Image (cartoon, rainbow, N blue to C red):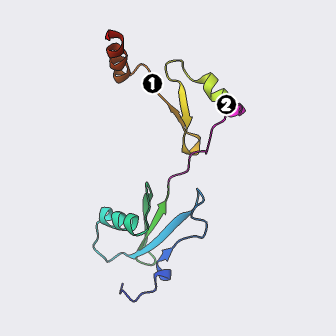
Amino acid sequence: MSEQTDPRRYLHIPNNFSDDDAEIRIGLPAHLDFSRDVVADRITQKLALEGATFSWHRRAARRTYEIRVKKPRKPPARALFKDPKARELVANAPESAPIIGIGSGGRIISVDLRCLTCQILHELRRRR
């Protein structure tokens, strides 16, 4: 692929890339010898992406690779305790692992109070 190639032929960035489900598509010729890690690093740097995931798809009919880049889902701006879902999550959480937040995709963030690190910190505090 020459440098004069119009980027719109191989780089597809949707207008709604700020949405959680949007993805960037990049087409690369299959005959190029490249390292996937190097390509992912360059794309991340050039497009100023953080925490993006890359998936590689070989398109045999066109003899190209298509790289799909997705950004991580945004966590909710806030999780209100008055929300029935949040109340249910807190109520169903084990006492040894209370919920401290809700992450992207509704993933529960909790802390395991039984973990070894927490026990050590507790023991150090107790000895003072």
Identify the residue under disc 1: 112
Residues under labels 2 and 1: Cα distance?
21 Å
State yes or no: residue 79 in magenta.
yes
- Where does residue 3 sit, x and y in percent of width and height? 36, 86
On the rendered image, what quadrant is the C terminus found in?
Answer: top left
Q: Nearer the viewer, residue 8 or 83?
A: 83
Q: Nearer the viewer, residue 19 or 2?
A: 19
Residue 95 as seen in the image, left or right of residue 41 = right
Mark 1: secondary structure:
loop
The residue segment tinted magenta is 72-86
Residue at the spot 59% in from the left edge and 41% down from the top edge: 106
Mark 2: secondary structure:
loop
- Where does residue 59 sit, x and y in percent of width and height? 45, 72
Neighbours of disc 2 within 10 Å: few (<14), some (14-19), many (20+): few
Neighbours of disc 1 within 10 Å: few (<14), some (14-19), many (20+): some
Residue at the spot 34% in from the left edge and 13% down from the top edge: 123
Q: Is residue 21 above or below residue 84?
A: below
Task: Give the residue type that dot 2 points to.
Answer: Phe
Task: Give the residue type that dot 1 points to.
Answer: Asp
State yes or no: residue 128 in magenta.
no
Residue at the spot 56% in from the left edge and 50% down from the top edge: 74
Identify the residue under disc 2: 81
- Where does residue 19 sit, x and y in percent of width and height? 60, 59
Residue at the spot 51% in from the left edge and 67% down from the top edge: 24
Residue 17 as seen in the image, left or right of residue 47 = right
